[in-house]
Image: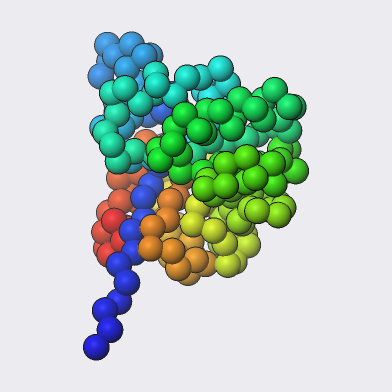
Amino acid sequence: MTNTPTRTLTVGALSWTDPRLVQALYPEDAPPEWWLSCYASHFDTVLVPESDWRGAVASAWLESLPSQFWFYLRVESAPDAATLAQLLDLGAQLGERLGGFVIEPMAAGCETALADGLPGAPVFSTIPKAGAQWLWTGVDGPCPCGAVGRLHFEGRPSPRELRTAIEGFLACQDEAWSVLFLDAPAESFEDARVIGQLLGVC
């Protein structure tokens, strides 16, 4: 008899500075320099926007975080040579804590340089070039895809909407560990975890 492989879905947000998370999940008197630690007490991974990683030093992020926490660096605009060098340097500083790079449409074209610069770091893109995997962006998006998805909701999605999305993402890839980033109200993350538990993946 063969055992069914265990699958794990991790849910994260599109920044630890999202005002919705700050208001709903962090202590009222927490200063901004504590926000990442506050975020990490609720999540295991984060999609870091350019506004957070430009000029950042990895040691400042890592000093107070649990060992099982991963950063995905989001590239939202076409990087020049200096920005690309900073991305690669920051990724190298993060080491095993770097989950990968997520490339948005305006930044398409840097996938190969990132994949070549840090061969062990996965690259996920909405318009993948050589060395990149498809970024899952919804039930109408590419399928099959890589192990990372990103979804945007204007308001709090219904449980049915969330379940449809999670099942759609899981159906498009069969990785043992996958990550779904949500741009949604704070309450949506607990909803997603409950649905994941019902599906046996959280």
Residue 157 drawn above or below residue 86: below
The image shows residue 81 at horizontal and vertical percentages of: 73, 27
Residue plotted at (51% across, 19% down): 56
Is residue 14 in sight in this rendering? no
Is residue 16 in sight in this rendering? yes
Quadrant including the N terminus: bottom left
Residue plotted at (52% across, 46% down): 121
Decide which of 120, 148 is in the foreground and name it.
120
Residue 152 placement, left or right of 186? right
Residue plotted at (52% across, 28% down): 90
Quadrant including the C terminus: bottom left
The image shows residue 82 at horizontal and vertical percentages of: 70, 23
Choose top left, top right, bottom left or bottom right for residue 45. Answer: top left
Residue 170 placement, left or right of 27? right
Residue 50 placement, left or right of 59? right
The image shows residue 163 at horizontal and vertical percentages of: 40, 60
Residue situated furthest bottom in the rendering: 1
Tag count: 0
Residue plotted at (52% across, 48% down): 120
